[in-house]
Image (spheres, rainbow, N blue to C red):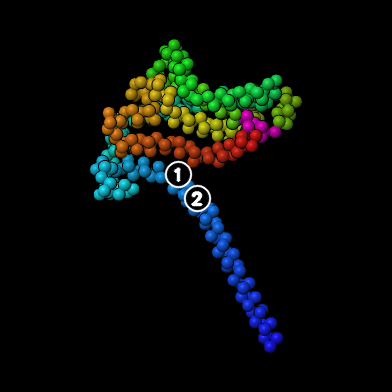
Amino acid sequence: MTDVGVVAQEIELAASTKDAPEILSWDSRARRTITIYIPLAIFVIVLLFPFYWMAITSIKPDFEMYDYKKYNPFWVHSPTLENIRKLLFETEYPRWLMTTMGIATAATFLSVGASLLAAYAIERLRFKGAQHAGLAIYLAYLVPPTILFIPLATLIFQFGLFDSPVALILTYPTFLIPFCTWLLIGYFKSIPYELEECALIDGASRLQILRRITLPLAVPGLISAGIFAFTLSWNEFIYALAFIQSTEKKTVPVAILTELVTGDVYQWGSLMAGSLLGSVPVAIIYSFFVEYYVSSMTGAVKE
C-alpha cells in the first residue's frame, strides 16, 4: 500500500510539473498582450487615425460628409477624385507647395550652417563662458514666437521685405538656430576630442579640422538638425500668416486655411486633400533618415 501511495504521489507531481510550463507560458502571453500589444495597438490607432480620416475625407463626395444617418462616417461609399482635382487644378496649390519647399529648404540650410559654427565654437574652442553661452542660446528657443512677432514685423517692414518669401527665410532661423545649436552641441560631445588634438599637432587649422574630421563624423547630427529645422519651417503658421499677403506667395499651412475657406463654407474635401498632400514630403524625409534622427536625438539627450 505504501508503494502504491508513493507511485500515486509521483504521478500527481509529474502531472503538475507537466502543466506548469503551460500555465507559465499562458501567463506570459497574457501579460505581454496586456502590457505591450494592447497599448501598442491603441497608440498606432490614435497615431494613424488622423491620416486615415484625411484620406477618406479627401475622396468623399459632399453628400456623404453631411448625411451621417445614411452613410457611415468612417467609410467611403462612393469615392471620387473631384476634391483632389479641384485642389490641384482650380487653386494655386502646386505653387504653394513649391513656395513652401523653397522657403523650408533655404531656412534649413541657413539655420544648420549657423548652428554648426556656433555649436563647434561653444563645444570645441573652450573659451570662457562657453557653457553659459550654450545655455543662453537654448533658452532663446523657449521664447514664444508671439513675443518676437512685433519686433520682427517692424524689421520686416523697415527693410521692405513684407509679402516676400525672403521675410520668412530670414525670420525662421530665429527659432531654428537655438535648438539646432543645442542639438549639435550634444552630438559634438560624443566625438572624441583626441582626434582634433592629433590634427592640431600635425599643423591643421581649425577650419581644416572642422571640414575634414568633425564634419564627416557629425553627419547624423546634421541630418537630425536638418530634419527638425525643415519640419518646423514647413509647418510654421504665425509668421507666414503675418508676413505674406499675396495668394500665390503663401505657404501650404496658411493657404489651405485662408484660400479654401470662403466665409462660413469649408471645402472639407479639398482641405483634407491639401493637408494630406502637404504632409507627404515631411513623411518621406523622415522615412529615409529616421535612424540618423533617433541616434542623434539620443546622443543629445544623454549629454
Amino acid, disc 1: Leu
**Spot occupied by residue 260 in the image (x, y as percentages of width and height):** 31, 31
- Return the residue nearer the eye: 55 or 143: 143
- Mark 2 → mark 1, Cα distance in angstroms: 10 Å
Q: In this view of the protein, can residue 171 be seen by the observer?
A: no
SS at mark 1? helix
- Return the residue nearer the eye: 81 or 243: 243
Vertical side of 294 occupied by 36: above or below: below
Residue 40's disc is 2
Is 282 colored magenta in this rendering? no
Total number of numbered discs in the rendering:
2
The magenta region covers: 184-192
Q: In this view of the protein, can residue 248 be seen by the observer?
A: yes
Q: Quadrant of residue 50?
A: top left
**Which quadrant holds the N terminus?**
bottom right
Callout 2 crowding tier (Cα within 10 Å): few <14, some 14–19, many ≥20: few
Vertical side of 156 occupied by 177: above or below: below
SS at mark 2? helix
Q: Earlier in the sequence, mark 2 or mark 1?
A: 2
Tell me the residue at 28%/31% (across/down): 264
Q: Quadrant of residue 236?
A: top left
- Return the residue nearer the eye: 146 or 282: 146
Tell me the residue at 54%/53% (across/down): 35
User: Residue beneath label 1, please?
Assistant: 47
- Return the residue nearer the eye: 259 or 6: 6
Q: Is residue 33 left or right of residue 128?
A: left
Tell me the residue at 56%/39% (across/down): 294
**Which quadrant holds the C terminus?**
top right
**Spot occupied by residue 273 in the image (x, y as percentages of width and height):** 34, 38
**Spot occupied by residue 278 in the image (x, y as percentages of width and height):** 39, 35
Amino acid, disc 2: Leu
Q: Residue furthest right?
A: 201
